[in-house]
Image (cartoon, rainbow, N blue to C red):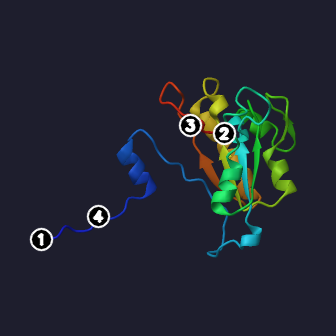
Amino acid sequence: MTDAPVPPLDASSLLSTLSPTLSITTLPQPVVADRLIPTAKRRILCYGDSLTAGYITESPYTRKYAPWAPVLAEAVGVPCDAVGASGWTTRDMVKHSDGGNRDACGEYRKGLCACLAERAYSTVIIMGGTNDLGTSSADEISSRLLTLHGQCHAAGCRTVALTIPQGRQIGPWTGVT
């Protein structure tokens, strides 16, 4: 007697199996024809806070951390730009989206819509919310992240949402930005 094959789980089913208290929100994606984006038109924007910036301003962390966009570009063979605003919350990201402002390190960072108006991107990876912890509710953070994703979709970009990484109180993360 052979066992019947087990059908693969979709992401929501897998997540609920692993942790019944978590859920996946499906973000609306722009309509894209079932064809690959031509290689010449592929470009990724990594947008977020200091975890995206990699602490590139002179600081005690400069030698320990580095931006991950260049590593991603090499790994996937697609040009990647990074805009990481140290200290920005999702509220700041939405507020300064059309222009920009100085981050916690005093560096001027462009807002998301300003970046999208300046250059065409096929995909935008958004990592935000870490600086909101303790000052905003999960619903507020999620709502603002959805706004940022919506801005990308309106510009014709696909998006990838990166989660807030675990803190030291949960588990150690060494050298990850």
Q: Quadrant of the C terminus?
A: top right
Which one is earlier in the sequence, the residue at label 2 or at label 3? 2
Mark 4 neighbour class, 10 Å CA radius: few under 14, some 14 to 19, many 20 or more: few
Residue closest to the eye, 39 or 60: 60
Q: Is residue 133 above or below residue 18?
A: above
Residue 20, picture quadrant: top left
The residues tagged by marks 1 and 2 sit, at their Cα atoms, a distance apart of: 51 Å
**Residue denoted by label 1:** 1
Nearest to viewer (mark 4 / mark 3) = 3
The residues tagged by marks 4 and 3 sit, at their Cα atoms, a distance apart of: 32 Å
Residue 165 badge: 3
Residue 34, picture quadrant: bottom right
Task: Say what amino acid the circle numbered 2 marks.
Answer: Gly
Horizontally, residue 116 falls left or right of residue 3, namely right
Horizontally, residue 10 falls left or right of residue 103, namely left
Secondary structure at numbered mark 2: loop
The residues tagged by marks 4 and 1 sit, at their Cα atoms, a distance apart of: 15 Å
Whether tag 4 and tag 3 are in contact, CB under 8 A, the answer is no
Q: Is residue 1 above or below residue 91?
A: below
Task: Say what amino acid the circle numbered 4 marks.
Answer: Val
Whether tag 1 and tag 3 are in contact, CB under 8 A, the answer is no
Which one is earlier in the sequence, the residue at label 1 or at label 2? 1
> Residue lying furthest bottom in this view?
35
**Residue denoted by label 4:** 6
Mark 2 neighbour class, 10 Å CA radius: few under 14, some 14 to 19, many 20 or more: many
Task: Say what amino acid the circle numbered 1 marks.
Answer: Met
Residue 94, picture quadrant: top right
**Residue denoted by label 2:** 128
Secondary structure at numbered mark 3: loop
Task: Say what amino acid the circle numbered 3 marks.
Answer: Pro
Q: Position of residue 41 (x, y in %)?
A: 76, 69
Nearest to viewer (mark 2 / mark 3) = 3
